[in-house]
Image: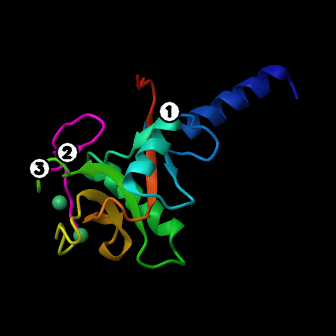
Amino acid sequence: MDARILIIFLIAAWVKEGHACRNGWVANEDTCYYFSHGESTWGEASATCLALQSHLAMVTSSEEHTFLINHLKQLNDDHDHTRYWIDGTDLEVENIWRWALTGDKLTYINWADGEPNNAQSGDCMNLYQDGGFKMADDSCEKHLYYICQENAGLVIG
Ligand SMILES: [Ca+2]
Ligand SMILES: [Ca+2]
């Protein structure tokens, strides 16, 4: 193949793909997500995301939430009751939900039916399969799956 045609083909393929993510990560807009294969406490999950130059997912719009819901439904076709940690927490002040990474109060919240119920001191936020992967609170010590998020150009220092 002519080298110029090959280069044009590769550029076209890259543009179609959008923002390039590392292997094992999934792209949406200019953000990459990692869906864990194992389960951890919320604190361990947060530390693992940081070790991967990322952070627990901050779900900040209905568009982003819809993308995650659709992807999680595909991933969990054969499973029930699955939950995925995200970065929200009300550890400091009950019922004041903040993103752990920034300390900002959540401006977008979409709770599953009956949530948050603070069951077992539920101070950490997850996306709950039985609630259509809407938001729920659970004990931070539970071992759940988790979603890491890496923003293009975001430097975590
Ligand atoms: Ca709580
Ligand atoms: Ca709950």
Residue 46, quarter of the rendered image? top left
Residue 134, quarter of the rendered image? bottom left
Identify the secondary structure beneath mark 3. Answer: loop
Residue 143 to residue 34: above or below:
below
Q: Which residue is mark 2?
A: 98
Residue 114 included in the magenta stretch of the image: no
Residue 25: image location, x then y, percent: 56, 45
Residue 150: image location, x then y, percent: 45, 37
- Cα–Cα span, label 1 and label 2: 21 Å
For the C terminus, the image quarter is top left
Q: Nearer the viewer, mark 2 or mark 3?
A: 3
Q: How is the image coloured?
A: rainbow
Q: Is residue 32 visible?
A: no
Classify mark 2 as within 8 Å of ligand 1 or not, answering yes or no: no
Q: Which residue is mark 1?
A: 53
Does the residue at mark 1 contact the one at mark 2 (Cβ under 8 Å)?
A: no
**Which dot marks residue 131?**
none
For the N terminus, the image quarter is top right
Give the residue at x 51% y 36%.
51
Which amino acid type corresponds to the residue marked 2 in the rendered image? Arg
Identify the secondary structure beneath mark 2. Answer: strand
Residue 123: image location, x then y, percent: 23, 58
Q: Which residue is mark 3?
A: 93
Give the residue at x 27% y 41%.
100
Q: In the visual, does 69 lie left or right of 11?
A: left
Q: Nearer the viewer, residue 67 or 9?
A: 67
Looking at the rendering, the stretch of residues picked out in magenta corresponds to 96-112
Which amino acid type corresponds to the residue marked 3 in the rendered image? Val
Q: Quadrant of ligand 2?
A: bottom left
